[in-house]
Amino acid sequence: MGVVSAREMLLKATEGKYAVGAFNVTNIVQMEAVVEAAERKQAPLILQTSVTPARFLGVRVLAAAYRAMAESASIPICLHLDHCADVGLCRAAADAGYTNVMIDASKETFEENIRLTASVADYCHGLGDITVEGELGTVGGVEDQIKVTEDEAALCDPDQAEEFVRRTRIDLFAPAIGTAHGVYKTKTPKLHFDRLRTIFDLLNGTSPRVPLVIHGGTGLQDDVVRRLVALGGCKFNVSTELKHTLIDATFDYLSTHRDEYDPGRIDRAVNKATIQTVERWIDVLGCAGKAG
Ligand SMILES: [Zn+2]
């Protein structure tokens, strides 16, 4: 099964009313653990990297590791570049073998967002079956290099959503509906379910055409996640929780094994904790057993 792009995988998820987990990884140990969890659950999978690891390790190294894992996996797996405001890096990732890229020009004006997003979509589609995600409205909080203050966070305007998708020719659409990156300050963040429903009906009402992406999964209650999935969110981004899992598992291991100098044991602790986190998300998203 292995290497695929996200469009078909997510159209199927939209029809089946489940969501595919899109898990951000910062290193190869995490990448392997996320793949292992998805294989155990026989779930389709989207691996994501944000811009910092894509620059630090390099898109070619990350794409090569992804290909090696995906080609021998029994499930379909995508590699996605998350929230990239740099058109050059979007292109470089597509050239290197990422199967999807997100151009995030959401802080620009509507027209400039369309211009930049369309240029990436044209480039990626010209290379073949590479899927492009665009964002309208801005998701609050901090995701890697993109910071959006509460004042700047703006909801997606449904009237503009259809025009944005049509003019950019993107494959996946991320509407800002009140979710945020990082850790929520409250257990019950104000989410705009009706807005998601309206946008879903506009873009996918008659038959699924443009899968919808939900950002800021970490910290949402399970029932909220299920409601967003029921309303049409079919790609669910989880980043902060995996960072916490990595750092907490490393810290916990070192706290009790301070006299050891065996990096492999730390890797195994991270592997085990990451698998638990990802398996739990796969269950909540309803994508276990959907790999076939
Ligand atoms: Zn995001």
Image (cartoon, rainbow, N blue to C red):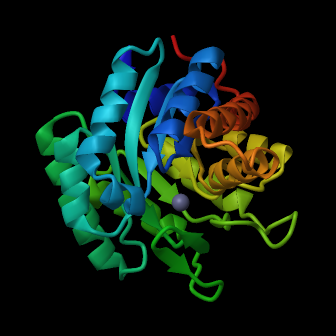
Residue 22: % across, % down: 54, 42
Quadrant of residue 120 within the rendered picture: bottom left
Q: Nearer the viewer, residue 64 or 289?
A: 64
Farthest residue in the right direction? Answer: 187
Quarter of the image for the N terminus: give it.
Answer: top left
Q: Nearer the viewer, residue 46 or 227?
A: 46
Q: Is residue 221 above or below residue 283?
A: below
Farthest residue in the front direction? Answer: 259
The residue positioned 27% from the left and 58% from the top of the image is 168
Residue 101: % across, % down: 33, 50
Quadrant of residue 79 within the rendered picture: top left
User: Is 113 on the left-hand or right-hand side of 226?
Assistant: left
User: Is 134 on the left-hand or right-hand side of 291?
Assistant: left
Q: Is residue 112 above or below residue 214?
A: below
The residue positioned 51% from the left and 51% from the top of the image is 202
Q: Nearer the viewer, residue 41 or 26?
A: 26
Q: Is residue 228 above or below residue 115?
A: above
Residue 218: % across, % down: 71, 54
Q: Nearer the viewer, residue 164 or 109?
A: 109
The residue positioned 64% from the left and 25% from the top of the image is 287
Residue 284 visible in the shown view: yes
Residue 174: % across, % down: 49, 56
Residue 83 visible in the shown view: no
